[in-house]
Image: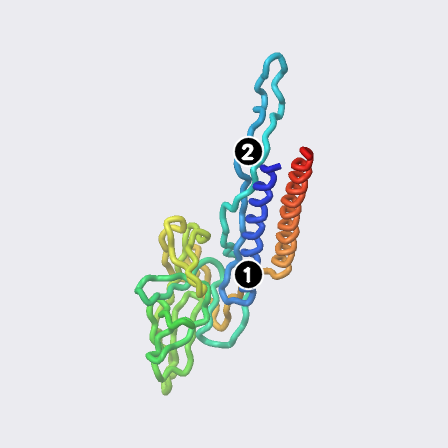
Amino acid sequence: MIRSLYTAATGMLAQQTQIDVTSNNIANVNTIGYKKQRAEFADLFYQVMEYAGVESGTTLGSPTGIEVGLGVRPTAITKQFTQGNFKETGNNLDMAITGNGFFQVELPDGTTAYTRNGAFKVDGAGTIVNSDGYKLLPEIVVPENAVTVAVGTDGQVAVLQAGETEANQVGQIELANFINPAGLHSLGDNNYNSTVASGTAIVGTAGLEGLGQIKQGFVEMSNVQLVEEMTDLITGQRAYEANSKAITTSDEMLQTVNGLKR
């Protein structure tokens, strides 16, 4: 009975993690470029009371043995980089990636972060930046007298300046990809940085070498499916209540045992 108290407690902690992850997914259902997360679990060690197949005295060995599980633990929270839905904005500097890849932005400390959020803008100097003012890499500057900005599916950026009839190329957007995107470290603000698990960034031209193409005038919305998350939330809540009930039941059984000496 004491064992059941601790086992059920691990179940409650695991389901709390599940609900935390699901709540974060629901909170970011409208976050541009957000990728949903999935909690994964594994059972803990087993207390072996009798090994399978081991003979005891004159009796034959048990074909199954007796093993009592000691609970559950979280093993990973995995990011799922499936494609989100596209939303048309009409903004020339909004971009979405159709397929694999990440935009590269420069953080204030000079390091590079990676993001699927393609809602870009220009700052006072004409540099293309994200909502936090981080520069898009490679750095691209839009001339002050630019009338229109066109971004090709391969990332070429061309502008039509006032008084001219032909567009001029002002930069080339490069995308980055990773062998294991799920190993990226989340920095918040829709940004990631590379880790040993993700591998180093593989930088290239959009549309080539497995990289997706760039779609101008669109942003990629969150890949969270609200119906699925609500289902997971209900499942997690019920599992949490069931583990809580197991603790209550074990406590009642202990009270009964303690009452036998009276």
What percent of the width, then of the height, locates residue 258?
A: 65, 37
The total number of labels drawn is 2
Q: Residue at x 59, y 13 (%)?
A: 57
Q: Quadrant of residue 5?
A: top right
User: Marks 1 and 2: which is nearer the front?
Assistant: 2
Label 1 vs label 2: CA separation? 38 Å
Q: Which residue is mark 1?
A: 223
Looking at the image, which residue sits at the far left?
110
Q: Could you say whether the residue bearing mark 1 is in a helix, strand or loop?
A: loop
Instruction: Indicate whether 179 appears above or below 212.
Output: above
Quadrant in the rendering for residue 205? bottom left
Pointer 1 or 2: first along the chain: 2
- Residue depicted at 50% across the width and 69% down the height: 219
**Image: 78 above or below 175:** above
The residue carrying mark 2 is 46
Judged from the image, the secondary structure of the residue bearing numbered disc 2 is strand
Write the residue at 50% across / 51% down: 77
Q: Position of residue 140 (x, y in %)?
A: 34, 72
Q: Is residue 248 left or right of residue 17?
A: right
In the rendered image, the quadrant that contains the C terminus is: top right
Display coloring: rainbow
The amino acid type found where label 1 is placed reads: Asn
Quadrant showing the N terminus: top right
| Residue 6 occupies quadrant | top right
The crowding category of the residue bearing disc 2, from other C-alpha atoms within 10 Å (few below 14, some 14 to 19, many at least 20), is few
Picture coordinates of residue 75 (x, y %)?
A: 50, 45
Residue 58 pos. (x, y %): 62, 12
